[in-house]
Amino acid sequence: MGCFLIRKIGQEIYKARIVEIEAYHGPLDLASHASRGRTPRNSLMFGEPGIIYVYLTYGLHYMLNIVTGEKDFPAAVLIRAIEVISKDKINKPMRSGPAKLTKAFFINKDFNGLPIYIKKHGLWLEDREKNLKNFKIVKTKRIGVDYAGKFKDKKWRFYIKGNGFVSKV
DNA sequence: CAAGAGATCATCT
DNA sequence: GATGATCTCTTGA
């Protein structure tokens, strides 16, 4: 949280701060793809952490996730919103929401299965600054998971308090 | 300003 | 054959 997501396209470098995320945690989380067992699509979530998991929803929107759990424990973090710092061009048309950021960063499922810690694919993470001011994290319920039974009210959505790029409050 | 519907397809049953 | 980890536009008050 608060780290930088870097995207390199050709010679252009785009830098963005991660300001909103959701956690999908474990085989029992009904909101997670992994809750129905291991399938070809979600098998990445059961693998090594640090792997990018991209997937298409509603037929047209790509979601950017990063696998977090240890091997064989299905868990991932959905990147829901970023604040683009380097390029106003991209910043302007982009409002909030997980599908917007993948569109703005030209992320598609070609990134599926690639490690996030290697720069050569043009997408990687960098640490945030130390001692950030006004850096408070709020946690709330996740969005769009009303079907998830007792897991729908888990407070596994996190965002930076007061940041204007967060999708909803 | 709030609420609702449509778009559109990979994946799973 | 059903169904979404969503977004945008349209409608109505």
Image (cartoon, coloured by chain):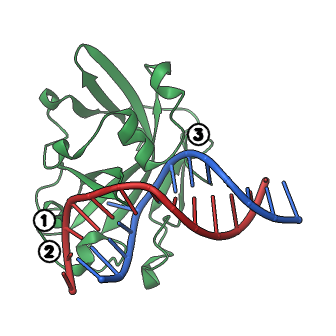
Chain colours: A green, B red, C blue
Q: Amino acid at mark 1?
A: Ser
x 50%, y 64%: residue: A143
Instruction: Decide: is C6 above or below A101.
Output: below
Q: Which mark is residue A38?
A: 2
Question: Which residue is denoted by mark 1 in the rendering?
Answer: A43
Observer-nearest of A28 and A94:
A94
Name the residue rendered at 45%, 84% in the picture: A150
Q: Position of residue A137 (x, y in %)?
A: 52, 50
Residue at image x 41%, y 40%? A101
- x and y percentages locating residue A41 in the rendered image: 16, 64
Circle 3 Cα neighbour tier, 10 Å, few/some/many (<14 / 14–19 / ≥20): some
Identify the mark nearer the N-term, 2 or 3: 2
* Amino acid type at mark 2: Arg
Res. A108 image quadrant: top left
**Of the numbered discs in the image, which one, if any, rests on residue A103?**
none
Q: Nearer the viewer, residue A32 or C3?
A: C3
Provide the secondary structure element on which disc 3 rests: loop
- Secondary structure of residue under mark 1: helix
Q: Earlier in the sequence, mark 2 or mark 1?
A: 2
